[in-house]
Amino acid sequence: MVALQTVLQSNANIARLPSGLVALFIGATSSGIGESTLQHLAQHAPAPRIYSVARPQSVAAHETLLASLRKSNPTATITLITADISLVSEIDKIVAAVTQKETKLHIFVTAGGRMAFEGREDTREGLEPSMSTRYYSPLRAVQQLLPLLNAAPSPRVLAVLAGGREAQMNEADLDLRDPANWSYWNAAVHAATMCTLALERLARGNPRLSVVHWDPGPVATPGLAKWDKYGLTPPNQRSQDEGGTRGVFLATNDRYAVQGHGGLVPVPEGLGGVNKSGGGIFLVDADGESTDNEGVLAGFRERGVDEMVWSHTEKVWAECAARARSPKDEL
């Protein structure tokens, strides 16, 4: 376990980084881990350029938060991008907003998503929102942002979902379009498992890119509070502030950088290394340590399920793009 004091000491060293760190956040608008991670990075980094995405209905509240962060760190440039990440086609808008102003991207944090306890209600793209916000949209963002990430000296992707909890999927119905296959739990399992397999594929093709898929465990966020009425609230919850503190640690400390491509915050003295998955990414538990889920993941890779997931994902992206271009959908 990485002690909280070690995490705090590491995060204090973010202030020593060169100015101009560029970071993009998806899923930082719901008073959760993403928002807390954004707050801590904005407070520590010298003259960072931070982009944060908010749905139209969340813009006013999120802009209030961003204004407070600009006030607390006058050197920071913090830009709000309005987009609905439940729609894959909206990712183009996010990527364009960043690429128009930046030549590199050091950190991409995706922490969006929810458990669809209320049932399934598809978006106009035909996707279930908990799966699009957790998987299809953020992975599309990573794929499109690779040129900017690869231009950074030590690029990092932090996916806040359920790294290490991958499980068997319905391989004949990956997006669970058949109502008989869908449940909020199946949707969560599919999103987390496909996320790891797709991130591994991207990491193998981009060896300088460090990818962390993190399971933060129970964190006392408003999203987790909604679990109460379903009798699912877990014990031993960490505070939201600690969740964000640990999120920044994972996004900036060289302990979670691929070998030879560190360059952000040095590994704290006395803290050992962490192992990557067989597919080349860091699966990290709530305590900041690597998890071993090769019993599941190795079998997927041996059978080519990772390539099947990627082919399926590209097909879904293409379908979403076609719907966005359709005159019918514009009416």
Image (spheres, helix red, strand yellow):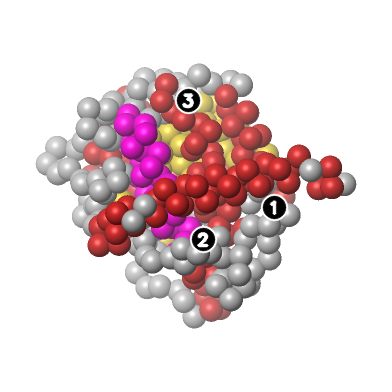
Residue 83 at x, y = what percent? 67, 42
17 or 43: which is nearer to us?
17
Is label 3 or label 2 in front?
2
Measure the alpha-carbon separation of dots 3 and 2. Answer: 30 Å
Q: Does 114 sit above or below residue 112?
A: below
The kind of residue on which mark 3 rests is Leu
Question: Which labelled disc corresponds to residue 125?
Answer: 1
Query: What stretch of residues is rendered in magenta?
Result: 189-215
Q: Main secondary structure of the magenta part?
A: helix
Residue 108 at x, y = what percent? 46, 37
Residue 278 at x, y = what percent? 25, 48
65 or 52: which is nearer to us?
52
Residue to which mark 2 is pinned: 174
Residue 163 at x, y = what percent? 36, 55
Is disc 2 placed on a helix, strand or loop? Answer: loop
The kind of residue on which mark 1 rests is Glu
Measure the alpha-carbon separation of dots 1 and 2. Answer: 16 Å
Q: Classify residue 49 as left or right of residue 250.
A: right
Q: Quadrant of the N terminus?
A: bottom left
**At 69% from the left edge and 52% from the top edge, which residue is drawn?**
125
Q: Classify residue 165 as left or right of residue 289.
A: right
Crowd band around label 2 with a 10 angstrom C-alpha radius: few (<14), some (14–19), many (20+): some
